[in-house]
Image: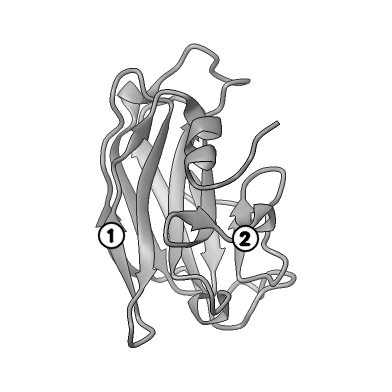
Amino acid sequence: APATPAGGHDDYNVLGMSWSGDVALDVCALVCTGNRVLDDDHFVFYNNPVTPDGSVGALAATPPDKAAIRVSFDALPARSDRLVLVAAVDPEADPHADLTGFTDARIRLLDPALTELGVLDVSDGRPGETALVLGSFRRRANGDWDFVLGGKGYPGGLVQLVEDHGIEVE
């Protein structure tokens, strides 16, 4: 089994994401209350690979996944009730791409040993969109987390998506 990631927790899951198509994508996670990110430090992406408390962090993906996020659901801040997963075209790698080729997307729920616990299908991308909410895990009143399929796309890319979730982009 892989070692617990630095700053991480012993009890965590890996969310492995895969899709068809060759477009270069960034996969990010937003720790939210409702549709608002708690703060800039709870937006996990390439420039901020882990939350301050270590509850969510980016991981190197292992095949067949193209991206991976580690999450310790029990360690998420008490004020959070949602973990939103998003994919966005990397404008530096693919400046003219959109999500037309983002198909057959899925999220694999894995344990720390990378044993598959379940598979969640997510929405395909659409022409003209460059960012997409894949889905969110939402905390229920009893403390359990349920997955809710996303599908909202953004023609303005990751900037428009994160601004829609309360992050100011300069």
Task: Name the disc covering residue 148, or none.
Answer: 1
Q: Which amino acid lies under the numbered mark 1 shown in the image of this protein?
A: Val
Residue 107 in the image, given as x and y percentages of width and height: 36, 54
Q: Nearer the viewer, mark 1 or mark 2?
A: 1
Q: Which amino acid lies under the numbered mark 2 shown in the image of this protein?
A: Gly
**Which residue matches tag 2?**
57
Question: In the displayed image of the protein, which residue is found farthest to the top?
Answer: 96
Few, some or many residues within 10 Å of mark 1 (<14, 14–19, 20+)? some
Among the 4 quarters of the image, the one containing residue 41: bottom right
Q: Is residue 128 visible?
A: yes
In the displayed structure, would residue 119 be above or below residue 20? below
157 horizontally vs 92: left or right: left
Question: Which quarter of the rendered picture does the N terminus lie within?
Answer: bottom right
Residue at the image position 26 percent from the left and 41 percent from the top:
123
Q: Is residue 64 visible?
A: no
Residue at the image position 37 percent from the left and 24 percent from the top:
129
Few, some or many residues within 10 Å of mark 2 (<14, 14–19, 20+)? many
Per the image, label 2 sits on a secondary structure element best described as: strand
Residue 121 in the image, given as x and y percentages of width and height: 25, 51
Among the 4 quarters of the image, the one containing residue 170: top right
